[in-house]
Amino acid sequence: MSDSDAGGEKEQESKRASRPVTAAARRERRASARPAGKATAKDQDKARPAAKAGSSTEGTGKAAEAKKGRATPKRVRKDKKPSLLARLMRFVREVWAELRKVIWPTRKQMVTYTTVVLVFVAFMVALVYLLDFVFRKGVFWLFG
């Protein structure tokens, strides 16, 4: 066997192992991969006629029919509310647990963030002042 023949066999194997492109090919591949036991059981279920809603089947007796006539009883929920102090203590414990999860910034990061915020606020104040000045001059020029 030559090298070109061996390469050709590998290409054919890779083509067979690749995913099917069309929907019909996918359905065919799924059908061939399905075990025979499940397919026959599904076919038998389709062939079996469905029972009517009003007919009784084996295993259900008069006890089941008697339960159908009455309303479902309401659940009795009497959860006791903890005291105010217990609720407050639980709240503090949960807040403390959440604060332990926080990743706090370092001093260097805090200085950087604070500087960025202050520069941005100063820029916005200057922009609003400039726009106010321009509009004020325009209104005084227009209306005198």
Image (cartoon, helix red, strand yellow):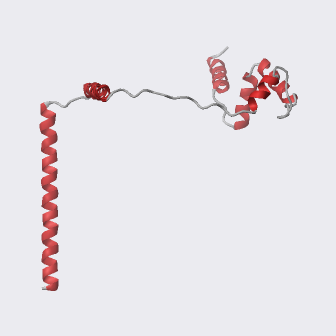
Q: Quadrant of residue 71?
A: top right
Question: Which of 68 and 29 lies nearest the eye of the viewer?
Answer: 68
Relative vertical location of residue 64 with respect to residue 123 in this rendering, above or below: above
Question: Which of 87 and 104 lies nearest the eye of the viewer?
Answer: 87
Q: In the rendering, at what x and y percent does residue 81 appear?
A: 39, 28
Quarter of the figure with the N terminus: top right
Total tally of numbered discs in the picture: 0
Q: Is residue 89 left or right of residue 3?
A: left
Q: In the rendering, at what x and y percent does residue 83 appear?
A: 33, 27
Q: Quadrant of residue 59?
A: top right
Residue at (24, 28) in percent of width and height: 103
Q: In the rendering, at what x and y percent does residue 56 appear?
A: 85, 28
Q: Quadrant of residue 86?
A: top left
Of all residues shown, which one is farthest toward the bottom? 144
Question: Which of 50 and 127 lies nearest the eye of the viewer?
Answer: 50
Residue at (26, 26) in percent of width and height: 96
Q: In the rendering, at what x and y percent does residue 19 appear?
A: 64, 29
Relative vertical location of residue 143 with respect to residue 42 in this rendering, above or below: below
Q: Is residue 137 left or right of residue 64?
A: left
Quarter of the figure with the C terminus: bottom left
Residue at (17, 84) in percent of width and height: 142
Q: Is residue 13 left or right of residue 87?
A: right
